[in-house]
Image (cartoon, rainbow, N blue to C red):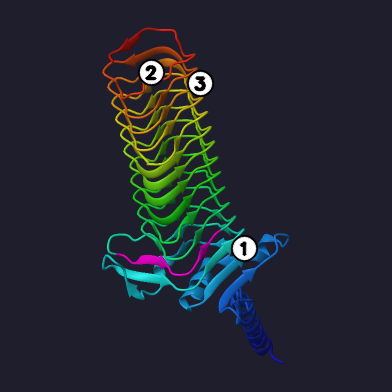
Amino acid sequence: MKPSLLISALGVLLCGWALSALGQASAPTTTAPLDLNPATNCMEGLFSPDQPVDERVVPSSAVVESLRGGHCLRLRHAVVRGDLDLRTLPVNGVADNGAPRVSIKGAFVVVDSLFEGQLLAAAIGDGAVVRFDGPAVFRGTRFGPLDFSGVRFSDAADFAGATFVDTVMLDRARFDRGASFADATFAGPLFLGQARVAGTFDLGEASFDSVLRAFDVRAESVRLDGARFATTADLSGLRTETLSARRATFAAQADFSGGDWRRSARFEGAAFAGATDFTGVRFGALDNDFSQSSFAAGAGFSHARFAGSADFGGAAFSQTADFHQAVFHQAALFNAASFAGPARLSEARFLGWVDFRGARFSDVDLSGALFLPPAPNWDGAVIDGAVEAEN
């Protein structure tokens, strides 16, 4: 064979090999990240925590395509890689405000998993509003940035035990069947302004390492039992039937001002290290219990209204306790309470039984206070400072 022909043949062979290799390198993987379960019509990625991470990766695009196909979703011990924007799903309805709506029809279940990127569903301007029609379950899952502002949960919303390492946006979110964030950890700020909850809003045993902004929230009941707040907690304007924050700890400012709690409020054993504001709160017609609670900084209860009993038995006030113009419609119990700072009860109205037995005061101001019969019980009370009383 002539040299020129040999070179030409080798060129053809080499070119064919290169094209073949390129085709093999760019060929899409044949392994589906999710499997369809015909029994449930759910796309599933159910892994073992012992599997290598690379074997548990589910691209966010696969989640979107599963939902786009009308399937419910079930992930366990999965790693969702990439930003997940639920607003890219097809519009299939109209929201209450007339905006286009994206309804996720089936269950959205992601437990003990990890979202490596952002999880987005918030409406922006006239953008689509996202609604979960089925259960939204994220128990034990770890999140990056999450923005569910304005999202509606028509069924259960379960974030119990979840970890949030970045900002969580739930402003104006609506929960039609309650919401659980029990035992969740918030490393970044949580925004809940104007959220609406039909049922119980459960934040019991949750840890807040950053600020909580939950002003003007409406809920049937709110549970904060055992919750730990490392910085500012803003729950001003909260409206609920019952509020329970037994043994909760507040390391910085706690703002409950302007609340309306129609049945009861339970703060037994709660610890307030920063300034605490209950100014103007309308306490409920049943039990309102602050027994054995502690206030290391100023405690503001001025203009508060206690429709039911108010129990501060054994409570400890290290600085000013301000009950100026507070109204107690039923029993007001301060037995064995200690007031290391000034106790300001000026112009307060006590319309039921009042118990100061065994209380300790450094300074108490009763100027203008009104006590209906019978007279308060002061047995064993100790008053170290001056007393201003106008009966």
**Quadrant housing residue 331:** top left
The image's mark for residue 40 is none
Does the magenta portion include 388?
no
Q: Helix, strand, or loop for circle 3?
A: loop
Residue 381 placed where, x, y %?
A: 47, 14
Q: Between 15 and 135, which is closer to the camera in this rendering?
A: 135
The residue at which mark 1 appears reads as 78
> 186 above or below 196?
above
Q: Helix, strand, or loop for circle 2?
A: strand
Q: Determine crowd level at label 2: few under 14, some 14-19, many 20+ residues with C-alpha closer than 10 A.
A: many
The residue at which mark 3 appears reads as 336
> 228 above or below 144?
above
Name the kind of residue labelled 1 in the image. Answer: Ala
**Quadrant housing residue 121:** bottom left
- Mark 2 or 1, closer to the camera: 2
Question: Do residues under tags 2 and 1 come within 8 Å of each other at their CB atoms?
Answer: no
Q: Which residues are magenta?
A: 127-138
The residue at which mark 2 appears reads as 343
- Mark 1 or 3, closer to the camera: 3
Residue 2 placed where, x, y %?
A: 69, 90
Q: Determine crowd level at label 3: few under 14, some 14-19, many 20+ residues with C-alpha closer than 10 A.
A: many
> 240 above or below 100?
above
Q: Residue at x 38, y 18 (%)?
A: 343
Q: Residue at x 60, y 72 (%)?
A: 44
Q: CA distance from mark 1 to mark 3?
A: 54 Å
Viewport quadrant of the N terminus: bottom right
Q: Helix, strand, or loop for circle 1?
A: loop
Name the kind of residue labelled 3 in the image. Answer: Ala
Viewport quadrant of the C terminus: top left
Q: Determine crowd level at label 1: few under 14, some 14-19, many 20+ residues with C-alpha closer than 10 A.
A: many
